[in-house]
């Protein structure tokens, strides 16, 4: 099975990897079949863990390889890193401004993005979908980078990134389905809406892989861009969302560090 996967086209590898991350999102959403609620401290810690994974992945799997590849290509590494990283943040900010969405716990009247009459359930799903765009893009870029044949990009590192993104997708699926169930939607509809938020990852993954395969000179920028987009999501949403209750902050902080350690271990061990 391992040899079969390694011999696949990088785009197919990216597709399979992001189908896996989507599947973990669906698994998290499936917790809605066990009840309407989940212990808030547990959910906060899960979101904190996800934030730690994304922070670690942004550096170990994206920024560091991006800087190394920029040096190998003869680019000014620090400039490539800054331009790509900030570009990812600006891209996510623009989507945040224009895409209608609402974060869990917020009133519909506080929805962000352009004004719309869409239902609250749709706005909640779009909020998590916003998170999953850079995650899918990061996985796709990582697998596309391997095809470039540069020593800084390894199949182990790409697999580690996909595993890390998958792990942190579990609480994101739960964070969509549980609020929808509490608001009166059926278990099946809450589950379906929760897993829909992960559907964008295979699309973004394939796009990322195709992009770097066709424009390899932009590979370092793409890696740093994905890192910037992921950090935007962490700072703008995951950390504030996980620390809404002051009494949970210490536990959430340790969970965030745990998530960072797990992703760092995966990347160092497999990359």
Image (tube, rainbow, N blue to C red):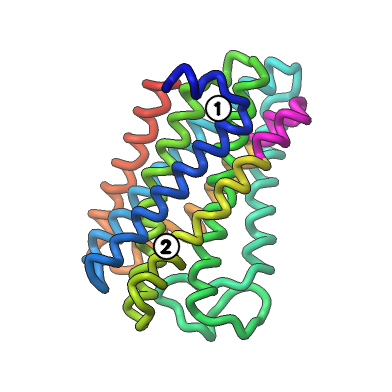
> Residue 245 location, x and y as percent?
29, 68
Residue 261 placement, left or right of 227: left
> Residue 216 location, x and y as percent?
74, 26
Residue visible at 50% across and 24% down?
A: 5
The quadrant where residue 212 appears: top right
Dot 1, crowdedness within 10 Å: few (<14), some or many (≥20)? Answer: some
| Secondary structure at numbered mark 1 | helix
Q: Is residue 216 magenta?
A: yes
Q: Quadrant of the N terminus?
A: top left
Q: Earlier in the sequence, mark 2 or mark 1?
A: 1
Residue visible at 52% across and 65% down?
A: 127
Q: Quadrant of the C terminus?
A: top left
> Residue 120 location, x and y as percent?
50, 80
The residue at which mark 1 appears reads as: 64
Magenta portion: prevailing SS class? helix
User: Residue 240 — which label?
Assistant: 2
| Secondary structure at numbered mark 2 | helix
Magenta residues span: 208-223
Q: Nearer the viewer, residue 1 or 10?
A: 1
Dot 2, crowdedness within 10 Å: few (<14), some or many (≥20)? Answer: some
Q: Total number of numbered labels? A: 2
Q: Nearer the viewer, residue 202 or 63?
A: 202
* Residue 231 seen anywhere in this rendered image of the structure: yes
> Residue 78 location, x and y as percent?
67, 29
Residue visible at 51% across and 83% down?
A: 108
User: Residue 190 — which label?
Assistant: none
Q: Nearer the viewer, residue 225 or 12?
A: 12
């Amino acid at each position: 099975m391992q040899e079969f996967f390694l011999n696949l086209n990088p785009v197919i590898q990216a597709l399979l990897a992001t189908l896996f991350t989507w599947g973990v999102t669906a698994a998290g959403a499936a917790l809605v079949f066990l009840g309407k609620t989940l212990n808030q401290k547990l959910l906060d810690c899960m979101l904190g863990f996800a934030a730690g994974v994304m922070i670690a992945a942004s550096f170990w799997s994206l920024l560091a390889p991006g800087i190394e590849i920029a040096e190998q290509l003869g680019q000014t590494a620090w400039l490539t890193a800054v331009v790509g990283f900030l570009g990812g943040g600006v891209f996510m900010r623009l989507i945040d401004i224009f895409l209608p969405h609402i974060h869990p716990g917020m009133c519909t009247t506080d929805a962000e993005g352009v004004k719309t009459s869409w239902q609250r359930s749709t706005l909640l799903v779009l909020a998590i979908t916003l998170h999953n765009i850079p995650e899918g893009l990061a996985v796709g870029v990582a697998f596309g980078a391997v095809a470039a044949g540069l020593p800084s990009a390894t199949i182990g590192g790409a697999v580690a990134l996909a595993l890390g993104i998958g792990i942190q997708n579990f609480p994101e699926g739960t964070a969509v389905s549980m609020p929808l169930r509490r608001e009166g939607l059926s278990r099946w509809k809450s589950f379906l809406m929760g897993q829909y938020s992960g559907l964008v990852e295979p699309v973004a993954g394939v796009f990322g892989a195709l992009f770097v395969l066709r424009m390899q000179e932009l590979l370092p920028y793409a890696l740093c861009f994905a890192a910037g987009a992921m950090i935007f999501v962490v700072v703008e949403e995951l950390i504030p969302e996980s620390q809404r209750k002051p009494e949970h902050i210490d536990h959430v902080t340790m969970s965030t560090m745990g998530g960072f350690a797990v992703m760092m271990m995966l990347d160092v061990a497999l990359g």
